Image (tube, rainbow, N blue to C red):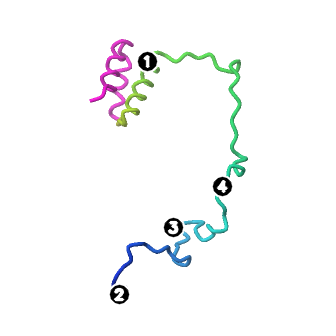
Amino acid sequence: MYAWQVSALPSAPQQSEIDPYRFPGARDIDTHSALTASDSSDDFLLPAPDPKQRIPFALPAADKRRLAVHTVLTTKGVAPMPGDLDAIKALCMLDDTTLTTVLRWITSPG
């Protein structure tokens, strides 16, 4: 191999080449071991909520519709812009049948 040729395989950077400000913890990466299943002692399941402690609150129909519209838009990958909130608010004032039809139009493929 000539001096002007470059290998196709990149070489690993030397320890002295690693910028500690750009990659914090990179210098001592060899001293840390990978996490194993036994190392996850701080991860635990929360207990189920007590139904008696729930606040008796029913979500208004317009708010349920607003959640449905945001859910459908998010599922389709459409992020609502700040100006779209007025249009979403207007859609939420429609009755359930009309809004269901509009959401079906949005979610239909093609």
Q: Quadrant of the C terminus?
A: top left
Q: Determine which residue is flagged by label 3.
A: 22
Q: Secondary structure at mark 1?
A: helix
How far apart marks 4 and 3 lie (CA) works out to: 23 Å
Residue at (57%, 66%) from the top-left corner?
Answer: 24
How far apart marks 1 and 4 lie (CA) works out to: 46 Å
Task: State the residue in front, 95 or 8.
Answer: 8
Q: Position of residue 30 (x, y in %)?
A: 63, 68
Q: Given the current orientation, which residue lies at the most extreme front position?
A: 1
Q: Quadrant of the N terminus?
A: bottom left
Tag 3 and tag 1, C-beta contact below 8 Å:
no
Where residue 16 sits, quadrant-wise, is: bottom right
Q: Determine which residue is flagged by label 1.
A: 62
How far apart marks 3 and 1 lie (CA) works out to: 48 Å
* Sequence-earlier tag: 1 or 4: 4
* Amino acid found under the numbered disc labelled 1: Ala
Q: Secondary structure at mark 2?
A: loop
How far apart marks 1 and 2 lie (CA) works out to: 73 Å
- Graded by Cα atoms within 10 Å as few (under 14), some (14 to 19) or many (20 or more), the crowding at tag 2 reads few
Residue at (38%, 73%) from the top-left corner?
Answer: 8
Q: Nearer the viewer, mark 1 or mark 2?
A: 2
Q: Position of residue 81 (x, y in %)?
A: 35, 37
Q: Secondary structure at mark 4?
A: loop
* Sequence-earlier tag: 3 or 1: 3
* Amino acid found under the numbered disc labelled 2: Tyr
Q: Determine which residue is flagged by label 4.
A: 35
Q: Is residue 109 left or right of residue 60?
A: left
Q: Determine which residue is flagged by label 2.
A: 2
Q: Nearer the viewer, mark 2 or mark 4?
A: 2
What are the residue bounds of the magenta stretch?
82-110
